[in-house]
Amino acid sequence: MSQALADVALVGFVAALFAAFVAWFAIIIFGFKAIRRVRPAVELWGRGTLWNPANVLLSPSLLTEEGLRYRHKCLVSIGVFIACVGIPLLIAAITGQLK
């Protein structure tokens, strides 16, 4: 592999790592914001969430409209994170650079 192509690949991997880092924090922020916006009748530490407040992200009927928007942003951030981590790993595995 030429040095220029290796440099471009390295810059791409670093950019993907940085984007994954940002997406990880977006997951945390939007997840907490969604969890805080449940319907008034829902108990976060109750049977409806199986005593785990994060389970409201799996059941959209427990969230308000604003909570649904934050849930959507959280799920998009999860997809971005998986793509930013998975695509470089896949490329490294295909090219034999994964050791």
Image (cartoon, helix red, strand yellow):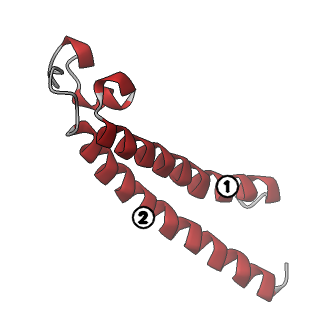
Q: Up-down: is 28 above or below 71?
A: below
User: Looking at the image, which is closer to me, 39 or 19?
Assistant: 39
Q: Residue furthest right?
A: 1
Picture coordinates of residue 58, whole percent (x, y) = 39, 27
Mark 2 to mark 1: distance in Å?
Answer: 16 Å
Q: Residue furthest top?
A: 47
- Residue 99: tell me if it is visible: no
What residue lies at 58% left-to-right and 66% top-to-bottom? Answer: 16
Which label belongs to residue 87? 1
User: Looking at the image, which is closer to me, 29 or 34?
Assistant: 34
The crowd level at tag 1 (other Cα within 10 Å; few <14, some 14-19, many 20+) is: few
Picture coordinates of residue 84, whole percent (x, y) = 58, 58
Q: Up-down: is 61 above or below 25?
A: above
* Residue denoted by label 2: 22
Which label belongs to residue 43? none
Work out whether mark 2 precedes mark 1 in sequence or the reverse, and give the earlier one: 2
The crowd level at tag 2 (other Cα within 10 Å; few <14, some 14-19, many 20+) is: some
Q: Residue furthest bottom?
A: 4
From the viewer's perspective, is 98 left or right of 63?
right
- Residue 18: tell me if it is visible: yes
